[in-house]
Image (spheres, helix red, strand yellow):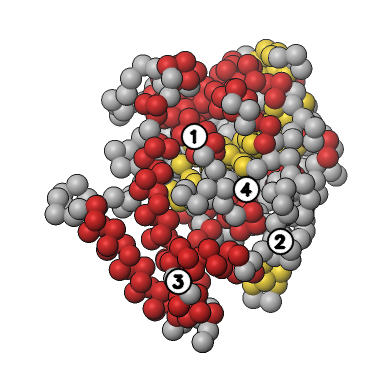
Amino acid sequence: MNRREFLFHSGGGLGGIALATLLGSESLLADTTRRPDGGLHHKPRAKRVVQLFMAGGASHLDLFDFKPELVKRHGQPSDFGEPVEAFQDGLGPWLRPVWDFKPYGQCGKPLSEVVAPLGAVVDEIAFVHNMVGKTGVHSQGTLLQTTGFDRPGFPGMGCWVSYGLGSLNENLPTFVVLPDHRGLASNGTKNWDSAFLPSHHQGTVIYPSDKTPIADLFPDERASFVTPASNQAGIELLARLNRVHAAERPGDDRLEARIRSYELAARMQLAAPEALDLTKEPAHVLKLYGLDHGQSSFPAEINAVEETEYFARKCLVARRLLERGVRFVQIWSGNDNGFPRRNWDSHEDVQRDHGPLAIGMARGAAALITDLKRLGLLDDTIVLWTTEFGRMPSSQGGKGRDHNPYCFTNWLAGGGIKGGISYGPSDDFGYKPADRKHPTQVYDIHATILHLLGIDHTRLTFRHNGIDRRLTDVHGHVLSDLLA
């Protein structure tokens, strides 16, 4: 009798999964077991992560990284002191920040007026201004930030967290993705695919603004003949057929993931609607997120009010999921198609493209941090803001900026992060890190987050094609200066 037959004959279904858990989670962990205190390799500072991803390449120069030299030299011919390979030859005159900056918080951090709401929580945030990428191509830059590799075929960060730490709530997914309502960003589902990790670690997609936030969780409303009892019976029948099929095919984790997905879907039919029901939130919380004006009609020409509702709604849903035990929530702003642009890829006009998105992002992100702190969840929840690369200090077509993979900004808050600091300055123009020999890479961000979750990034591995793969590849070090 093989392993799957043993589990099936020992009870199957949830009983089999429970037995497998008691036997050591089927040896899924890399080289050790989880500690009683919730960590994997050491005592954790954080339990969960929310990642805010600005798809298209958000401009650090117009949001967070103030450069007086650009104000001084605005309109003068740009001179980088070296040959520059630009994505679309956007090497026009120097372009000052589109919006004015002023200091906020006790730390006195300068922020652009377009992200002014973040000023209320800036003392909780650590800004990393010397981020560098490997490419100016959207698809590769996005994958590098989401998976640690600039090519497809590798698990998303949320998948690694799910694989390493497991679930805090068996009735909800461990890793949830809240995409932009207008469509997916570069690479689509590859950004949260489990790749070679067991399939049940991939992200579950939820659209909070849609009439049906989770696809296929309930029978189609046109199928009136489907009753709750018959629906449950169908789920159980499919799961039983899959168990029989899996017992005859040991080693195929896709079948096991399918079984788990049916069982999780059955539990989610009760847990998910409650988690996504924002009507249970008090008026002061809806006001905090800017959601107190009623449901938007979603007009074709979207303004900052609608953008606030779109992004802030996802932030509030993320908070509700996190407090119910979801380990990793990924929130996206911007998609990969459409014009006028509804993403952060501002080649033509930074003010037009960044403006509404930035206002909505700042309102939602500030509310999320404030709300997590109010509930006592910020201490063990990491908030990560990122994008695939920044924008150039030179202009493109007068009002736009080209891609800049040579320097951009990430910021983090909560979960053991030291707030009110700026780490790793960029040069006077925001073109490259001030210290070019010691930039910060995405591997360092990933290593730091895993460390705060109780994971040694060098030891969380998965054997694939003869290689011990990990989120940080063969790179990365913990940014100790960011730790509280």
Q: Is 315 placed left or right of 122 in the picture?
A: left
Disc 2 versus disc 4: nearer the observer: 2
Q: Can you give x and y, in whole percent of width and height, for residue 111 in the image?
A: 66, 19
First of labels 4, 3 by sequence position: 3
Disc 2 versus disc 1: nearer the observer: 2
Q: Can you give x and y, in whole percent of width and height, for residue 144 in the image?
A: 63, 52
Disc 4 and disc 1 in contact, CB within 8 angstroms: no
In the rendered image, the vertical position of residue 378 relative to residue 89, given as above or below: above
Distance, label 2 to label 4, CA atoms, is 27 Å
Identify the residue at the far bottom of this view: 1
For the point 40% across and 43% down, the residue is 272
Q: Residue beneath label 3, please?
A: 11
Q: Can you give x and y, in whole percent of width and height, for residue 314 in the image?
A: 46, 33
Find residue 436 and report its image quarter: top right
Q: Residue beneath label 2, please?
A: 33
Disc 4 versus disc 1: nearer the observer: 1
Depth order, front residue of 434/229: 229
Q: Amino acid at mark 4?
A: Gln
Find residue 64 and report its image quarter: top right
Q: Amino acid at mark 3?
A: Gly
Q: Is 79 placed left or right of 174 in the picture?
A: right
Distance, label 4 to label 3, CA atoms, is 42 Å
Q: Under tag 3, what secondary structure?
A: loop
Distance, label 2 to label 3, CA atoms, is 25 Å
The quadrant of the picture occupied by the C terminus is top right
In the rendered image, the vertical position of residue 125 relative to residue 332, given as above or below: above
First of labels 2, 1 by sequence position: 2
Q: Is residue 382 visible?
A: yes
Q: Amino acid at mark 1?
A: Arg
Q: Residue beneath label 4, please?
A: 145
First of labels 2, 3 by sequence position: 3
